[in-house]
Amino acid sequence: MKLASVAIAAVFHTAVCAVVKLDSDGTPELEFEDLTVVGQTGAKIHTTFGDGVRGDFKIPLYLKDGLDPESKRQRRAERSRKMKSFTEQPLSNNTAILTNVKDYYYYGYIGVGNPPQKFSVVFDTGSSNVWVPGEACVSDACNEHRQFKNAGSTTFQSSPQKIQIQYGTGFIAGDVGTDTVQVSKSLVLRNQSFAMTSQEDKTFELPRSQFDGLFGLGFTGGAEGNIRSPVDSMVQENVLKSPLFGIKLRRDSLSGNGEITFGSYDTSYTNNLEWIGVYGDIFWATTMEGILYGGEPQNYLYGADKVSAASGVLAVEEKARASRKALLDTGSSLIYGDPFSLAAMSTRIGANPLTGEIPCPVLASLKPFHFVLGGKRFTMQPEEYIFHDPATGICEVQWMPVSDYLWIMGLPFLQTYYTVYDIKDHRIGLARMRQ
């Protein structure tokens, strides 16, 4: 079976202060200072399976709930301090540096236009569009963020195309244009189409959403408006040494940030990479065959027992449940899956299936969960799938129910595994992250 049609997008925000310098060859060099808090959003996906089974899924590519009032106050103060100091953060030759905000999300920087106008964005493997706030937008959300100025770019090309995206928890509309998009010092897309919002709802207002836009890393097949995705542009414009990119996301508890390396990857992981195939040409999704606990034989993936049954015996709904897919998504704060599997997983480890809370003292006795993706097993230890807040003493699972069929392997999983995304051969390599 093959995904025949998908419409999906995800959005996030951050304000940014930036400095432009010119290299000796005259190429603009991007240097940034960020101002970041937390946002929340969602997306709608409509999927038609090749055998006629259709499902409508809502994928909340959203971030954890916002910070408490005191934390927000402290972050606003930190933002003010940074704005005054104008600390510069240059990008390296082919690597975009990502900042981790309390494991809610990671953000980096792009430059749009010539000379480049700077925007902070979430590099999102779960979507395929690029968008930033437009100058003509009068929504409060736009006015609170950096806005792209068409007249400020000598290479901007307008188009009559409009775009509207209805998110699970928000809405944007805008105009499509084409311009130069600079991702790192040496990675420049000369003719990348992107959206400039003309309308954003309250979902994207401050203080909830403080970064500007989104940089989708999915394939063109998943782009709203039939716009060529940035990763496909990278291949077609031949700006990558190799048609792939690697992502490293460190946990906040380790005081780590993250990075995306375009055109290559950290070769110290080469011998440990397990390669799995990408399902379809939409996003970085693969098949999901099972969820195991410790050395127990029970498969906690609901509907997995139907996979080997004759297709003619299965009802339409059971066919869809047996055709599980898992999306590796750098834009989601948690792991999202069907409520049946997650309730069974929570119950097995002694967590409240409704709230997700679990007594912290039992962590030492828990066993790992094994996720079977693309036919291969990937393990998460208790400290990787349980979040422990030392300030409150609360422990809770790192998953949340959203859909009967499509799983989202978000940050808890991607902080556990270094990932390499092979654009040409449509495959993903995973290797356990080194601390």
Image (cartoon, rainbow, N blue to C red):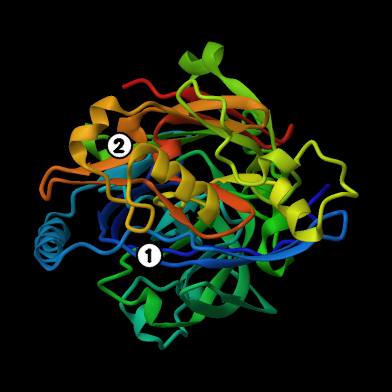
Please say if 399 is above or below 195.
above
Q: Position of residue 147 (x, y in %)?
A: 40, 73
Q: Which is more foreground, mark 1 or mark 2? A: 2
Q: Position of residue 134 (x, y in %)?
A: 47, 77
Please say if 274 is above or below 254.
above
Residue at point 71%, 36% (across, down): 426
Q: Where, by quadrant of the figure, is residue 369 drawn? A: top left
Q: Position of residue 168 (x, y in %)?
A: 51, 72
Q: Where, by quadrant of the figure, is residue 428 drawn? A: top right
Q: Secondary structure at mark 1?
A: loop
For marks 1 and 2, the one nearer the N-term is 1
- Label 1 belongs to which residue? 13
The tally of labels here is 2
Observer-nearest residue: 8 or 260? 8
Q: Secondary structure at mark 2?
A: loop
Q: Position of residue 81 (x, y in %)?
A: 10, 58
Residue 15 visible in the snapshot: no
- Label 2 belongs to which residue? 251
Q: Is residue 7 left or right of residue 339?
A: right
Residue at point 18%, 54% (across, down): 86
Residue 264 visible in the snapshot: yes
Q: Amino acid at mark 2?
A: Arg
Q: Amino acid at mark 1?
A: His
Q: Is residue 36 left or right of residue 378?
A: left
Q: Are the residues at dot 1 and dot 2 in contact (C-beta closer than 8 Å)?
A: no
- Name the disc covering residue 359, or none: none
